[in-house]
Amino acid sequence: PAHPYTKGLLNSIPRLDQKGQSLYAIQGLPPSLLRIPSGCAFNPRCDRVQDVCHTELPRLVPVLDAEGADLPGRRSACHFWKETLHG
């Protein structure tokens, strides 16, 4: 995943090999649709949040692999998609 929210959703899927362990949950609550935060709407719940996330709406950009090649059909709207995808 190239967005922290997508990564969080995938990490929350129960797995048979982790039976009896606590499930991962994205912290906080989704924002009210009447009061969407400025910048990235996910910023109140994101573990990668930085100042830019509160002020600038991230653009939807092509996702590239580690060598810089386009991954067809993959896009991300996160200021830190590279760090999320490549670790």
Image (cartoon, rainbow, N blue to C red):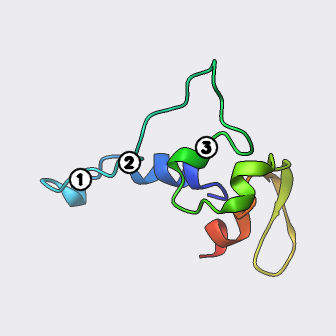
Q: Using the numbered discs, state the Cα–Cα distance from disc 2 to disc 1 in whole angstroms.
A: 13 Å
Q: Which residue is mark 2?
A: 12
Q: Which mark is residue 68?
A: none
Residue type of the residue flagged with mark 2: Ser
Please indicate whether residue 51 sits to the left or right of residue 75 in the image. left
Q: Using the numbered discs, state the Cα–Cα distance from disc 2 to disc 3 in whole angstroms.
A: 17 Å
Which secondary structure lies at badge 1?
Answer: helix
Residue type of the residue flagged with mark 3: Phe
Which quadrant does the N terminus fall into?
bottom right
Which secondary structure lies at badge 3?
Answer: loop
| Most foreground residue, 54 or 75 | 54
Q: Using the numbered discs, state the Cα–Cα distance from disc 1 to disc 3 in whole angstroms.
A: 29 Å
Name which of mark 2 and mark 3 comes first in the sequence.
2
Horizontal and vertical percent position of residue 73: 82, 49
Q: Relative to residue 20, is residue 69 depicted above or below?
A: below
Name which of mark 1 and mark 3 comes first in the sequence.
1
Depth-wise, is mark 2 or mark 1 nearer the camera? 2
Residue 71 seen from this side: yes
Residue type of the residue flagged with mark 1: Leu
Q: Which residue is mark 1?
A: 16
Q: Which mark is residue 42?
A: 3
Horizontal and vertical percent position of residue 13: 37, 46
Residue at (51% x, 60% y) in the render: 47
